[in-house]
Image: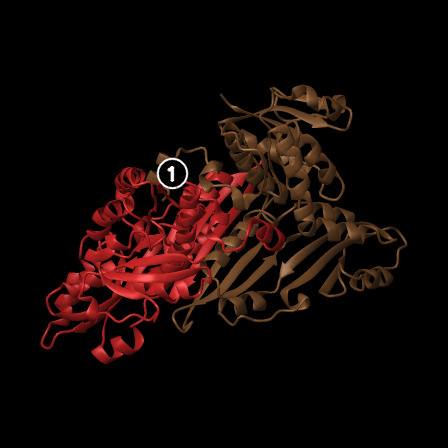
Chain colours: A brown, B red
Amino acid sequence: MSIRIGILGYGNLGRGVECAIKQNPDMELAAVFTRRDPAGVSILTKEAAVCSAAEAMEWKDRIDVMILCGGSATDLPVQTPEYAGAFNVVDSFDTHARIPEHFANVDAAAKAGNKVGIISVGWDPGMFSLNRMYANAILPQGNDYTFWGKGVSQGHSDAIRRIPGVKDAKQYTIPVEAALESVRNGENPCLSTREKHTRECFVVLEPGADAASVENAIITMPNYFADYDTTVHFISEEELRAKHSGIPHGGFVLRSGKTGWEEEHNHLIEYSLKLDSNPEFTSCVIVAYARAAYRLASQGVTGCKTVFDIPPAYLSVKSGEELRGSML
Amino acid sequence: MSIRIGILGYGNLGRGVECAIKQNPDMELAAVFTRRDPAGVSILTKEAAVCSAAEAMEWKDRIDVMILCGGSATDLPVQTPEYAGAFNVVDSFDTHARIPEHFANVDAAAKAGNKVGIISVGWDPGMFSLNRMYANAILPQGNDYTFWGKGVSQGHSDAIRRIPGVKDAKQYTIPVEAALESVRNGENPCLSTREKHTRECFVVLEPGADAASVENAIITMPNYFADYDTTVHFISEEELRAKHSGIPHGGFVLRSGKTGWEEEHNHLIEYSLKLDSNPEFTSCVIVAYARAAYRLASQGVTGCKTVFDIPPAYLSVKSGEELRGSML
C-alpha cells in the first residue's frame, strides 16, 4: 500500500512536493489543502483532490503524512503544532533561532496526538545541518564554514522590492571564491561577513524613479546589504523575466580539522549543493523524511524529531538488505 | 563516567584510534590488545594497559566498546563475530562484496551475546556510503559517481612490491579532473574505468633490476593496472622516504539528479574528503560510531548495525537540545 501524502499550502514548495511524490513509487498524493478557493486551484496530479484547508481534519484517516508547505514567519509556528495533534507531519521551518521553541511546541502536540512531527527539513536547515553535525562528531578539533549560493535569496529580493521606485528585483547571494579556497587549503581563516559573500541585485525601476537613490537605498540597507559588497544592475522587465526567473540556490558546508597525537594532520570535509530549483530540492528532502515519519509512526514512535534523530535508512525506499548490498 | 574503549590490533588504524580517543573528552582508552609480545609494544597513552590478545576476554567487564583494528582480508571475518559475542564492537570491514555475509555473522553473534556490533565504519565504506544513500533517497532520478583520490592505495602499492626486482613502491590513485567536471556540469557521462582514474607509481628498484621489465609488469598487471593509464617513476629509496611516506587519501561522491514534473531541473550533490592521513580519519569515524555503539547498548539494542541504521545524533557528544540549538 502506498504512503498517502497530504499537502497543506500550494505555492512553490507545495508544487515541488507534488513533483517529488511522482518520483517515489511507494507514495501517492491524496489531497492538496489550500486557504484559497479550491475551485480556483489547479494541480498537476489528476488523481488527487483539492480541498479547503478548513476540511483537512476530515481527512485524518485517509492521510498518512501531512506535509506543511507554509512559511516560517507566521504559518508554521501555528500550523505545525496544530496539525501534529491529528497527523504525522513534516515541515521546513527555517528560522534557525526559533527552532528550540518550535521543537517544544510540536513535540507536545505530537505526543498528545500520538503522532510524529519532523521539523526543519530541507537543505539548510536539513542536509547542511546533518553535514555540520557528522563532520563535527568525526573531527572534534576543527572549524566550520557554511557558504550559501550562488542563489536567489527570496528575503533579500523582497527587501529590494519594498524600496519606493522599485518595480521588481532579484537578488543573488554569491560565495567569495578566495574565501572558499582559503578554507579548502586548510588555512582556517577567520572570515568577516563581507569576506564570505557578495550580493548582486537585478532591479527594474518604476517609470521616473531615480536609479542613484534606489542604488543607495539598497547598498546601505542595514542587516540586508550594508555589511556586504553589493552590486546593483538596472535592467528592463523583459530582461528580468528572461534571465532571472529561476530560483536556483546551493552552497557549501566545510569542516577543516586536525588529527594525530600532536594534531599534525589536516583533513577537509566538504559537502556542496548546486540546485536549479531551491523549492523542488527542498521538497525532495521533505518527501524522503515523510517516508521516515510514516515508518516511525508505524513503529509507535511519537513526538517531534529532527534530521539528527532519524536513522538514514528510514529515508530510503530500499530495505536494509538492499542498502547493504548496493550502497555500503 | 567515560566510555571505556579497547583497541584490538595496534597498527596504523589502532594508533589512529588511540589519537582520536584523546580528542573525545567522554572517552578513555582502557587497553590495547596485541598479537605481538605486549612487552615489545609501546603505546602513546600512559594510562592505558597493553595486553596480549589472548587476555582480551578477561576485560569483558572493563571495556564498553572494543574497536577491531585488524585487516578485512583475514582478521575481521573471524574476529568481529568472535568478539561481538562478548563486547560491543566496531570494525572497518571494507570488502564491499562480502558485507552481507559479514553482517549476518556479526548479527548472529552479537544477538547471542546481547551486544551491539557496528560494521564497515570509515569513509568508504562509511561516510561515502551514507552520502550515496542520502543522495539517492533525496534524488530518486539520477546517477551516482564515486571517485577516489588523490591518495595512496595500499593494495596497489603492495601489488607492485611483489614484483621481482622491486624494493619498495607507493601507488597513487588520481581522479581524472575532466571526468569530475563533466559530472559537475550535469552531463551524466557514462565513464569507463580508464576515464575515471589514473594511477601513478613511485618505485625503488633492487640493485641490478631491469626498469623496463618492471614497468611492463606493472602497467600490464590485470585488475590492478591494465585497465588504467598508469605512470611509473623510478626513484631512490631516499626520495621515496622523503616525499612519499604519508598515507593521504580522499575522494568524491556525487549524485546528479533531476526534479520537476517533466524532470526539467538539474541538481548536484557533492561530498568530498581531502585527508592527510587515511588511517587517522578512518579512526575518527570509528570512534564516533563507538559512542553510538555504547549508547545503543545502553538502550538494550542488540545485533549488527551499519552506518545506515544509526541516528546521526548518536555520534555526537552533544545532547539533542544542544545540537538543535547550535547546528540545525
Q: Which residue shows up at 50% across the image and 58% down it?
A: A136
- Up-down: is B256 above or below A184? above
Number of numbered tags placed on the structure image = 1
Q: Nearer the viewer, residue A97 or B3?
A: B3
Residue A46, image x and y in percent? Answer: 61, 21
Report which quarter residue A52 is drawn in: top right
Q: Nearer the viewer, residue A109 or A213?
A: A109
Q: Is residue B284 visible?
A: yes
Q: Is residue B13 visible?
A: no
For label 1, the residue is: A323
Name the secondary structure under disc 1: helix
Q: Which residue shows up at 70% across the image and 59% down it?
A: A200
Left or right side of A58 for A296:
left
Left or right side of B250 for B36:
left
Question: Which chain contains the residue that carries disc 1?
Answer: A
Q: Which residue sits furthest right?
A: A208
The type of residue carrying mark 1 is: Leu
Crowding near pointer 1: few (<14 within 10 Å), some, many (20+)?
A: some
Q: Nearer the viewer, residue A234 or B311?
A: B311
Left or right side of A218 for A83:
left
- Up-down: is B260 above or below A190? above
Residue A191, image x and y in percent? Answer: 62, 69
Residue A190, image x and y in percent? Answer: 60, 71
Q: Which residue shows up at 15% across the image and 73% down it?
A: B205
Residue A6, image x and y in percent? Answer: 63, 27
Q: Nearer the viewer, residue A75 or B244?
A: A75
Q: Quadrant of the C terminus of chain A?
A: top left
- Up-down: is B112 above or below B189? above
Report which quarter residue B204 is drawn in: bottom left
